[in-house]
Image (tube, rainbow, N blue to C red):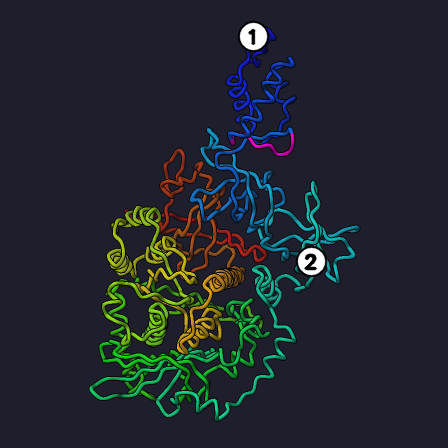
Amino acid sequence: MGKRKYSAKEKFTAEQASMLIMGLMGRNPKQIYNHKQISKMLFINDKQRRAVVSSTLDELVRKKQLEQIEPGRYRLLSRAGYKTGTLDMTYHGYAYLVSEDDKEDVFIARNDLNRALDGDLVKVFVYPKKRRTGRVEGEVVEILERARTTFVGTVEISKNYAFLLPDNRKMPVDIFIPLEKLNGAEHGQKAIARIADWPDHVKNPFGEIVDILGYPGENETEMHSILAEFELPIHFSKEVENAAEKIPDGISETEIRNRKDFRKVPTFTIDPEDAKDFDDALSIRPLKGNLWEVGIHIADVSHYVKPNEILDLEAYERGTSVYLVDRVVPMLPEKLSNGVCSLQPHKEKLTFSAVFTMNERGAVLDEWFGRTVINSDRRFNYEEAQQIIETGEGDMKAEILKLYEISKALKEARFQNGSINFDQEEVKFHLDEDGTPTGVYFKVQKESNWLIEEFMLLANKKVAEYASRGGKYSREVDKQQEKSGKQKGKTFVYRIHDVPDQEKMESFTRFITKFGHNLNPQQSGSQLSRSLNALLGEVRGKKEQHVVEMMALRSMAKARYSTKNIGHYGLGFSDYAHFTSPIRRYPDLMAHRLLAHYLAQGESKNADKYENRCLHASDMERRAVEAERASIKYKQVEFMQDKIGKEFEGVVSGLTEWGIYVEIVENKCEGMISIKSLVDDFYEFDEEEYRIIGRHTKRQFEIGDTVKIEVVNANLSRRQLDYKLVEFERDS
């Protein structure tokens, strides 16, 4: 039915004009019109009524129902208006705007991205909710900050031009490379390209090659590609290396005299067999009254790395050491990380220590923090320390067994106070000299690991408590003031972990009922922690163990760094920091400097400055974790390449609208069964029930189901395994 035409004889009110204009704009929320176009579309063709339209448009702008993009041009103003946030691109080319201020993400269609890319900080115009979809939609109107300008990919050269085909599947376009900007890159090589320009109305950005990584499939090329993909460094600059080389190996007598001397106290380190950067050492000696002095000695990196000097600026930018499958990319040059700072045995080393007077039940009766000097008597690996714990025999057995006894008490008390017992296996690979995986094994935590972990947790906790009390020792804190909660902490770098989201916990509870387990998601604090621990104990050794642990972790908040101390829910600590690994984590180095400043009665530091540093450190940690996972995934695909056509037992580990993710039981290699390959029915993803179900047969696939799969493809470039369903069963 056509629009009604108004004749000159009929009265035309501003109210009628407003209703018609808003109806038109509501049906075309993205369009911009002038008053002549609006009058024409409303079949208003006389001068008087056009004047009403014009004045009504200005009134709607004043009422903030429309916005005037430029003089005389109007567009619907969404009730939500403009939003700013980070763009989360999908593999399918559309994206979501993620904003901390709004729980509901804004959907952005591919055609409305306007050259914005994954991770960009953008300004989005938000349209009203659509009746059909019910979701909030929007359009990118401004790119405020690019998340990145460099991309890793494969060079493809034609006669007159070239392209870089990005590895990142969230990058929706290839990068056009003029031949003169190849800078020596050859067809088929992996390289890094930088976007130099992206003109309006041009599909592909223009770029240039800035680094050549090598040919695909070579181990060095692929590991360097992963680092570049997450914008992580590969090498140190000559300037940084030279600065490190200038640091003297020796320690002056003056420096030793200014420190508490632990060189004659029994001291040792316990680390992985292949470790070279020894951050921490333990010492122990008996005191009167069946008490013990336990020293937790941490490499004093802050003595060597001074604020705002080149080594410090480099360490800050890196944020953390990166642990790939076959290598460590250190935060500090080798001269420091494996040499001067590393707590090697039989060498005098400078340390920053937390020293506690403790009883055998793990209670801390006194504490001291300060700079020390040590001389480690022995370097143990975890296997050697474990043998001493199990047999009661070996070097320094008295010290190790006593510390293990105290660590057991610490661990027991921690779980009683609400710490959650996540004890997941780590996937490791046996690699040949070329970096090719020859086998898979799983790293299991044992008592020697727990021994070290408990004392590191203790030091981190007590340092954070000291800072949160305003730089006072516990014995100096007035008890009444402590009870009133009036004492004010000083600016510090805390490691925080928020309480679980209620909605996620309810979803997790619904999930575990499929396996016959229960949990009350309404519980809070230590009650919920104890229930989670009981659940994790129930599933240990059962087929659903890994899946339940994985889903429990997904329901948790992410730990991060902040000056805002909200405590660490997962550990059950009201105060927690990272203090014990300054060789490999920049937040620990910040904690050392702040602690030293407050021990010297310094005033509280600027919180905003340190909060920004915390945000950067959290971001670099996230990138490092993602790079590590990518390297593991690459090696898993590489390991499975010669197993095409072989069958394996697996467990359903994830479900999406396009497929079923399955993790092989014997090697934890995860791949996907495409929904399209299930030809016995038409299968659909039921997001609400989190299952895939056949439309006709009602056959269902759920997380935790046991399946037999056949490996059909191992795509190294995409780090992707494709499986085919052979058999399926579900326990009744």
From the viewer's perspective, is residue 631 above or below residue 12?
Answer: below
Magenta stretch, overall SS: strand
Residue 640 shows in this picture: no
Locate residue 442, reporting x and y percent: 41, 67
Locate residue 278, reporting x and y percent: 45, 79
Q: Earlier in the sequence, mark 1 or mark 2?
A: 1
Please report the residue visible at 45 percent of the width from the left and 67 percent of the height from the top: 440
Residue at disc 2, secondary structure? loop
Kind of residue at disc 2: Gly
Q: Which residue is mark 1?
A: 10
Residue 188 image label = 2
Distance of label 1 from label 2 (alpha carbons): 72 Å
Q: Is residue 129 left or right of residue 398?
A: right
Q: Answer few, some or many: residues within 10 Å of disc 2's Cα (few below 14, many 20 plus, some between 14 and 19).
A: some
Please report the residue visible at 27 percent of the width from the left and 62 percent of the height from the top: 418
From the viewer's perspective, is residue 466 above or below residue 124?
Answer: below
Q: Is residue 165 left or right of residue 355?
A: right
Residue lying at the far top of the rendered structure: 9
Residue 386 shows in this picture: yes
On whether residue 207 falls in the magenta region, the answer is: no
Q: Is residue 183 left or right of residue 390?
A: right
Locate residue 211, reporting x and y percent: 68, 63
Q: Answer few, some or many: residues within 10 Å of disc 1's Cα (few below 14, many 20 plus, some between 14 and 19).
A: few
Residue at disc 1, secondary structure? loop
Kind of residue at disc 1: Glu
Badge count? 2
Locate residue 230, reporting x and y percent: 56, 60
Range of residues picked out in magenta: 64-71
